[in-house]
Amino acid sequence: MTNNDKSIGERVLKIALAVFSFLVLFFLFLPILVVIPMSFSSASALEFPPPGFSFRWYQALFSDKNWMEAMRNSFIIAAVSSTLALILGALAAYGLVRSGNRFVGILESNFIAPLIVPPVVTGVALYIVFGYVGLLGTFGGLIIGHTVLAVPYVILVMVVAVRAFDYRIEQVAYSMGASWVTIARRIMLPNILPSLLAAWLFAFITSFDEVIVTWFVSGAIPTIPKKMFNELIIEINPTITAIASLLIIFSTIGVWIFATLMNRKE
Amino acid sequence: MSNARKRRTSFVFVTPLLVSMILAFNVPLILMFALSFTNPGFTFEHYETLVAQPIYMKVLGNTIRIAVIATVVCAVIGYPLAYWISSLRPKHQVIMIAFVVIPFWVSILVRTYAWIVVLGNAGILNSFLVDIGLLEKPARFIYNELGVIIGTTNILLPFLVLPLYASMTKIDQRLIQAGESLGATKTQIFAKIFFPLTLPALGAGSLLVFMLTLGFFVTPAILGGGRVSMIANLLDILINSLPKWELASAVSIILLAATLGCFWIYRRLDTLRS
């Protein structure tokens, strides 16, 4: 084989690889590329490309009492459970990093475990326990379930944040007579605030998106993902494209804020 | 501050979460474990039922088959993608990785729904193929196992591509140069140096995809059209329709054990990687 042949063969291979990779990226992105234009369609059936532009599905969404109730529930549950997960998780992350205890590894694994245990298993386990204690179909039960699922994200973000904060600064403040409250408020908090916000956001999106545990323990309480799941099994209604697009935009903004917060920290 | 005091204050910080997690996570799992051996005394009968009745074995077989296929497809299309991205200029690498990560953030429900729009009976692909005369009537792309595999692959691909890409960028370029200077061809370098070095990451990523597919619920429920049952959908029926809590507990314990087993091997591979 001459040198020239080889470079032509190589070039063809390179182009083939690039084309293939673009196709795979297209495959990954296709769902997002399809859903957003569909939500602005004027057609009442699935038609692509949409025949005309309209806001009718957004109007249908916002004038539908059931969707609005689901949205309100999702916001309440996400707000409460992400805040709970943040408070409990941030305190625990601080304790985990600052203690020299040899059980720290086990504790941390236990806090991250809901990320590894299949959500459907967590759902069944919570269903059974909630069935015994009467929490099935209650906001309390849903908030407990979502908090458990959000805790791993808070732990992952906050352990890194606390570890990055120089312990000696705290020691100096302490030795100069600052109280715990002062240290927490004046020294810790300003330093870890971006991470706290990022962790809270992470937890909020986790809860807002959660469908599996919700499916098992929510009883008659509708949430956005649960209602979407329900409707997707029964029938296809273009209203879903509107809520789907809102969710895409919502999570994109969330990720963007998250990335900005993490960048500012560095 | 003394060490003892430090330990005590740390404990105070960890306790609220520890107590909450034990009550809301560990105790439910332990109770479920206990329930799977109860009727009302100690028994293995729920596990025996699972083995004895063909329907349960069929669901298990289905799940494992779909998980294996999805894993293989992810590996086959994910490896070239990761390889290509790692060969780009650093600035372009960041952009392409962003494209891999963004879908990650979009709700699984939304991404699953999109496949109905694309591949459904009245979907984009079918209307197109019928319009140009390639098909007489719409083909069935979804509401069967193919649909479940397409949806699953689409959602789990990033889990494979990201660790693979990371391992590829970490390869010591001097090894490649050494191969070149010794007269190895590009193919030889890839087969003898590059590929073996990425093998642990490929294994770890594949295992992650396999493990996550085992517990998939939303995608088979929607894109399987009620025809393709996986373990998670069986659990849904056992809890919400029948209900058979003890049997559901036994199935959950098996799923949990399989997942933890996969995760353990994954961690081993991960330490091998770094």
Image (cartoon, rainbow, N blue to C red):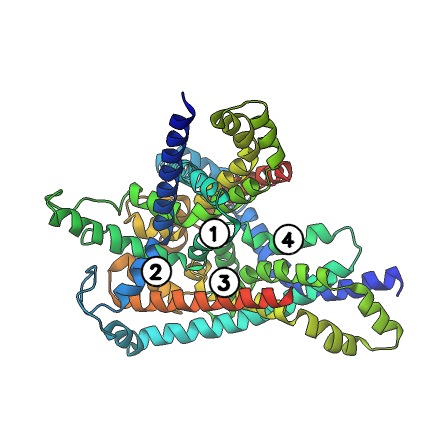
Pointer 2: residues within 10 angstroms few (<14), some, or many (20+)?
many
The chain under label 1 reads B
In the shown orientation, is residue B91 left or right of residue B120? Answer: right
Residue A206 shows which numbered tag?
Answer: 3
How far apart are the alpha carbons under marks 3 and 4? Answer: 18 Å
Q: Are marks 2 and 3 in contact (CB under 8 Å)?
A: no
Q: Which residue is mark 1?
A: B92
In terms of depth relative to the viewer, which is nearer, A41 or A217? A41
Residue B149 seen: yes
Asked if badges 2 and 4 are on one and the same chain, I answer yes
Question: Percent x, y for residue A69?
Answer: 37, 76
The chain under label 2 reads A
Q: Which residue is mark 4?
A: A110
Question: Percent x, y for residue A150?
Answer: 55, 62
Q: What amino acid type is highlighted by mark number 1? A: His
Q: Which residue is mark 2?
A: A229
Q: What amino acid type is highlighted by mark number 2? A: Phe
Asked if badges 1 and 3 are on one and the same chain, I answer no
Residue A164 shows which numbered tag?
Answer: none
- Point out the tag, 2 or 3, that comes first from the N-terminus: 3
- Point out the tag, 3 or 4, that comes first from the N-terminus: 4
In the shown orientation, is residue B154 left or right of residue B11? Answer: left
How far apart are the alpha carbons under marks 2 and 3? Answer: 16 Å
How far apart are the alpha carbons under marks 2 and 1? Answer: 37 Å
